[in-house]
Image (cartoon, rainbow, N blue to C red):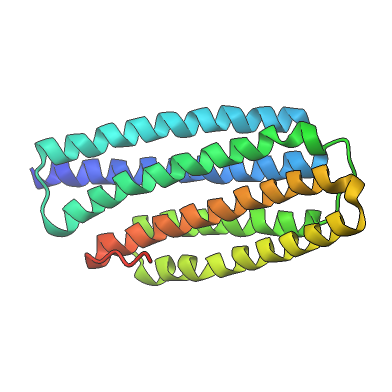
Amino acid sequence: MRKAFDEQMKQLHEKLTEMGAHCEQAIDLAAKALTTGDPALAEQVLSTDGEIDQAERDIEALCLKLLLHQQPVARDLRQISAALKMITDMERIGDQASDIAQMLPYVRQQKWQDSERISGMASETIRMVTGSVDAYVRQDLALASAVIEQDDVVDDYFNQVKQSLIRRMLEHPEEAELALDLMMIAKYFERIGDHATNIAEWVMFSLTGRHESP
């Protein structure tokens, strides 16, 4: 019985890792679509979001199977419960990467500043998603904690972008619409960081039994 449970838990880790990789790809494609103006990349984001949605359904089914047939207790139960929470945040990451890609028609024909900061936000959120999923698979409390701290970096990027865009709107009112679109894109990246933080917090719950989200 335990051997079958261990095999299914291994499968769960593999599926979560694969779903995390899809999330990373979606964020990366969305960022590249913005900087290159390539609509084909935006289409790839939407396709990847579909794969994320399917992964969520597959993992949810596997978790329910583990709960119903294996009757896990204590730490094993927390791991499965955490996985169910994590995939909800991962699915939202896919949605927000798609939201970013769908903004492409509004910004690709225009010259815009803050591209480096927004690209920086994208890179940091990819690192956070990778770290949070790795923390779950490795059962690494320190790595989960590091991901949570990294959210401050993303928040700082967002505040810099916001202040820059506010100045731009004041100095160039004719560019207000573009500035608002860029503000929305930055906010989507900031929310992706929040979802990665949520994932890391559920990893900590799976290891300690405590969920300390504010």
For the C terminus, the image quarter is bottom left
Residue 183 visible in the snapshot: yes
Residue at horizontal 10%, vertical 47%? 2
Taking depth in this image into account, of 22 and 171 the one nearest to the observer is 171
169 horizontally vs 159: left or right = right
Across and down, in percent, residue 106 comes to 79, 35
Q: Is residue 134 visible in this depiction of the protein?
A: no
Residue for point 57% across, 41% down: 96
Q: Is residue 201 left or right of residue 150?
A: left
Q: Position of residue 24 (x, y in %)?
A: 56, 46
Q: Nearer the viewer, residue 68 or 186?
A: 186
Q: Is residue 147 above or below residue 90?
A: below
127 above or below 12? below
Residue 181: x and y in percent read 74, 43
Q: Position of residue 117 (x, y in %)?
A: 75, 60
Q: Residue at x 37, y 61 (%)?
A: 201
